[in-house]
C-alpha cells in the first residue's frame, strides 16, 4: 500500500495500545508520541501534527470518562477523525458526467508525471464506461507527443496531436473540436510543463484554458517534495482555476503524507494518487477509506468496488454458475478466472484494502502476475478437449512435452501449472451442492452460502487476513453477502503464494 511505512507505524502504535491491560495517561501518550513521530517522518508539517495531538487530548479526557466507556474505541475514533480533518480540504471537485462532453485540462511542472497521469485518468474512466480522448498540447518538450501516442495506443484511447504545429492553443482547440464531433464525453488536454514556476508557463496555461474552456483543471504534482507542496499548489491555484489535484509517485518514498496534508491545507481536493508506473497503479483518493487503511482497519467499499468490476461478468455466465454447483472445474474455467483476476489490477492494491494489511508480509506482485501470464500462455497451446476435460489422466507425458514446446516453456513449468490446477480443482469441489439461484445476480448466492461454507473455500492465509471467522461473518453482513467471490479469492490465495 501507499505510505506503507506510515500505515505500519500507526497500526503498530494502536495495536500496542489495544494490548495494554489498562488504558491510562501513560499508554495514551506513548501511542500519540509514536503516531506523531511517524507523521513527522512522513514530512507532515509540525504545526498540523501538534494541533492534531492537542485536539485528541482534548477529546479523550481519561479522567472524565466513566468506567463503562470503551476507551480504546474512543481513542481510535479521535485519531481517525483528526487524521481525516488533516487530509480533507472540505470541498468536492467537479465530476464529469457520462454522455455530456467534458473538457479536463492537466497542468503541472515538468517531470511530475503529467503525460502518464493523463493516460491513467483516461484509462480509469474508460473502464467505468466513459468514452475518453487525449489531446497533446505540449509542444515544448521533445518527445511529449510520442509518449502520449504510445500510452494512448497501449490503452486503446483515441488521441490528437501534431509534429509540425508549434502553437499549443491551436492544437488544443482543434483536438477538442475533433473529439466533440466524435461524441467523446471526456476530452483530456495535456499541457506543457516547465522546470520552474515560470511566468511563460502560466501565460501559456491561461491561453489554452481560455481557448478550450475546460470544465476542470487538474494540477499534477510530484509527492517527493513533501510539505513544499503547499507553496506549489498555492502558486498554481492563484494562476489558474485549479479544481483538483492528483499526487503522483506515492510509491517511491516516505514524503507522501506531507504532500497530501500540504495540498489539503490549500483547500484543493486531491482526487487520485499515482502509486506506480503502470496503467492500473492509480487509486481514487477518498479521505475516510484512505485513513481507515492507514489505521489498519481496511477499506471494504474500495475492496468491493474492485471486485464488482469483475463480478458483473460472472453474473452473465449461467454455465459457470451451473458448473460451480456441480463442483466441476476445468482448465478453461481456470483460464477465464485468471483473466478476471488480471483485470482487477495488482493484488497488493486489493489486499491493502483488507484489515491488518499493514502488518502482513508483502508479496511480490510482478512475480505473481508473470506466473499467471505464463500459465495462460501454456493453456493457449492446449486443445479444446484438454481445456474442457475434468479427467487429468488424459494429459499424458507426450501431451505435456507438446504443450511445453508450443508455449516455449519448460516441461517442469507445465507440470507445475497442472499441480496448481489440481489444487484449485480440490478447492472448487468444496462448492459442490451449493444451490445456485436460477435468476437474479450472483450476490443472491449469499442466501445459500453461509460463512462456514465460505471459510472452507478461502485459503487460510486470506481468512486470517480478514480476521478469522468473526471478520468473515462481519464482512458478509456488511456487504449484504459476497456471492460468487469464492472462486476469485481462491485465485488470489494462489496469486499471493497460497498454501500448498
Image: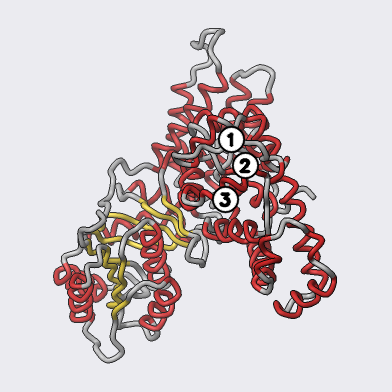
**Picture layout, residue 108 above or below residue 266:** below
Q: Residues within 10 Å of mark 3 (few under 14, many from 20)?
A: some
The residue under the point 55% across, 51% down is 319
Count every numbered label the image shows and give the total: 3
Badge 2 marks a residue whose secondary structure is helix
* 233 relative to 183 in the view: left or right: right
Mark earlier in primary sequence (1, 2): 2
* Residue 415, quarter of the rendered image: bottom right
**Picture layout, residue 66 above or below residue 291:** above
Image marks 1 and 2: residues in contact by CB distance under 8 Å: yes
Badge 3 marks a residue whose secondary structure is helix
Which circle marks residue 325 in the picture? 2
| Residue identifier under label 1 | 435
| Residue identifier under label 3 | 320
The residue under the point 77% across, 77% down is 402
* 93 relative to 270 in the view: left or right: left
Residue 161 in percent (x, y) is at: 29, 82
* 205 relative to 134 in the view: left or right: left
Mark earlier in primary sequence (2, 3): 3
For the residues labelled 3 and 1, the Cα–Cα distance comes to 13 Å
Amino acid at each position: 500500500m501507499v505510505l506503507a511505512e506510515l500505515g505500519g507505524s500507526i497500526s503498530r502504535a494502536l495495536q500496542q495500545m489495544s494490548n495494554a491491560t489498562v488504558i491510562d495517561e501513560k499508554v495514551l501518550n506513548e501511542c500519540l508520541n509514536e503516531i506523531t513521530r511517524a507523521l513527522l517522518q512522513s514530512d507532515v508539517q509540525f504545526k498540523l501534527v501538534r494541533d492534531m495531538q492537542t485536539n485528541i487530548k482534548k477529546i479523550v479526557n481519561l479522567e472524565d470518562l466513566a468506567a463503562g466507556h470503551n476507551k480504546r474505541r474512543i481513542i481510535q475514533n479521535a485519531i481517525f477523525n483528526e487524521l481525516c480533518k488533516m487530509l480533507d480540504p472540505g470541498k468536492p471537485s467537479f465530476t464529469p458526467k457520462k454522455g455530456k462532453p467534458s473538457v479536463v485540462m492537466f497542468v503541472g511542472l515538468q517531470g511530475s508525471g503529467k503525460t502518464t497521469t493523463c493516460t491513467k485518468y483516461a484509462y480509469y474512466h474508460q473502464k467505468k464506461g466513459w468514452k475518453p480522448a487525449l489531446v497533446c498540447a505540449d509542444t515544448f518538450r521533445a518527445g511529449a507527443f510520442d509518449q502520449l501516442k504510445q500510452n494512448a495506443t497501449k490503452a486503446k484511447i483515441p488521441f490528437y496531436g501534431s509534429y509540425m504545429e508549434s502553437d499549443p492553443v491551436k492544437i488544443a482547440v482543434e483536438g477538442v473540436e475533433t473529439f466533440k464531433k466524435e461524441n467523446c464525453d471526456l476530452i483530456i488536454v495535456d499541457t506543457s510543463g516547465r522546470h520552474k514556476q515560470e511566468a511563460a508557463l502560466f501565460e501559456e496555461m491561461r491561453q489554452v484554458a481560455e481557448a478550450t474552456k475546460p470544465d476542470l483543471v487538474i494540477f499534477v504534482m510530484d509527492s517527493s517534495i513533501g510539505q513544499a507542496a503547499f507553496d506549489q499548489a498555492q502558486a498554481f491555484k492563484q494562476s489558474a482555476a485549479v479544481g483538483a489535484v492528483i499526487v503522483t509517485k506515492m510509491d517511491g518514498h516516505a514524503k507522501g503524507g506531507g504532500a497530501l496534508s500540504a495540498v489539503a491545507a490549500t483547500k484543493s481536493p486531491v482526487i487520485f494518487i499515482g502509486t506506480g508506473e503502470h496503467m492500473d497503479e492509480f487509486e481514487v483518493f477518498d479521505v475516510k477509506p484512505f485513513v481507515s487503511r492507514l489505521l489498519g482497519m481496511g477499506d471494504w467499499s474500495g475492496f468491493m468496488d474492485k471486485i464488482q468490476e469483475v463480478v458483473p461478468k460472472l453474473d452473465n455466465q449461467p454455465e459457470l454458475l451451473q458448473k460451480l454447483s456441480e463442483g466441476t472445474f476445468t482448465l478453461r474455467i481456470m483460464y477465464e478466472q485468471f483473466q478476471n483476476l488480471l483485470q482487477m489490477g495488482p493484488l497488493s492494491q486489493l489486499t491493502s484494502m483488507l484489515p491488518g494489511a499493514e502488518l502482513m508480509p508483502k508479496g511480490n506482485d510482478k512475480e505473481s502476475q508473470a506466473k499467471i501470464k505464463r500459465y495462460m500462455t501454456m493453456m493457449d497451446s492446449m486443445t479444446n478437449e484438454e481445456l474442457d476435460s475434468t479427467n487429468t489422466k488424459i494429459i499424458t507425458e507426450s501431451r505435456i512435452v507438446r504443450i511445453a514446446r508450443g508455449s516455449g516453456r519448460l516441461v517442469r513449468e507445465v507440470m507445475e501449472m497442472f499441480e496448481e490446477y489440481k489444487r484449485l480443482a480440490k478447492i472448487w469441489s468444496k462448492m459442490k451442492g451449493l444451490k445456485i439461484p436460477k435468476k437474479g445476480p450472483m450476490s443472491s448466492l449469499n442466501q445459500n452460502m453461509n460463512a462456514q461454507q465460505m471459510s472452507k473455500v478461502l485459503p487460510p492465509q486470506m481468512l486470517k487476513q480478514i480476521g478469522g471467522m468473526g471478520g468473515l461473518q462481519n464482512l458478509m453482513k456488511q456487504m449484504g453477502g459476497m456471492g460468487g467471490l469464492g472462486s476469485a479469492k481462491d485465485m488470489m490465495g494462489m496469486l499471493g503464494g497460497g498454501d500448498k
